[in-house]
Image (cartoon, rainbow, N blue to C red):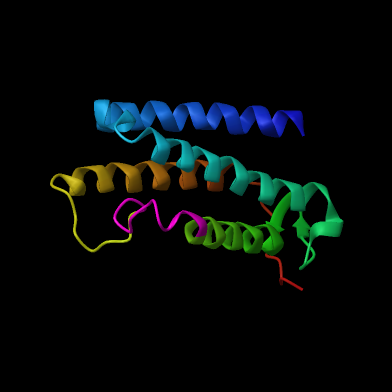
Amino acid sequence: MRPVLFSLFFDALLILLFLVLIQRRQTFAKPALLALFFGVYFLDNLAITLTNHFPCLQIVPNHIWGGFLLYGWSGKLYSFLLAVGLLFLVRPRVTKEDVGITLRQNEGFLLTTFLVVLALAAWALIVGLNSPKGQPDSGC
């Protein structure tokens, strides 16, 4: 469990660095919102991790194939319920725009969107090329 927590902390530092590089001083303009983001980040990942470490928490049993977690639906369900519950609790203090529920886009969003999609595609390619090869799983 300790390596998981270390990994979460390290990832959070990378996210904060990325936010500072993109938003600069605006990153710390709303410290409560930033704290809420990282609180949700840690709780969300903890909910997913705990269902993987403690099978008694699994509503839908995990299906493991080739040593890699293939289906972890219980953690995703807990994650969704946590997000909806937290949004319900903070709704008087946090606006829809603060959490990103808006159709309006800021200027310069295309470049940021392109960079994020490019980074995610590169990460998916690296993971896909380095994953073990084998017969397709039927899912049953």
Q: Is residue 31 left or right of residue 59?
A: left
Q: Residue at x 20, y 47 (%)?
A: 109
- 7 magenta-colored: no
**Image quadrant where residue 2 sits:** top right
- Give the x, y percent position of residue 17: 39, 26
**Residues in magenta?**
89-99
Q: Residue at x 48, y 58 (%)?
A: 87
Viewer-nearest residue: 36 or 114: 36
Could one spot residue 51 in this view of the protein? yes
Q: Residue at x 23, y 64 (%)?
A: 103
Could one spot residue 66 in this view of the protein? no
- Give the x, y percent position of residue 69: 71, 53
- 90 magenta-colored: yes
In the picture, the quarter occupied by the N terminus is: top right
Residue 89 vertical position relative to residue 137 in the rendered view, above or below: above
Taking the view exactly as shown, the residue that stands out farthest to the left is 107
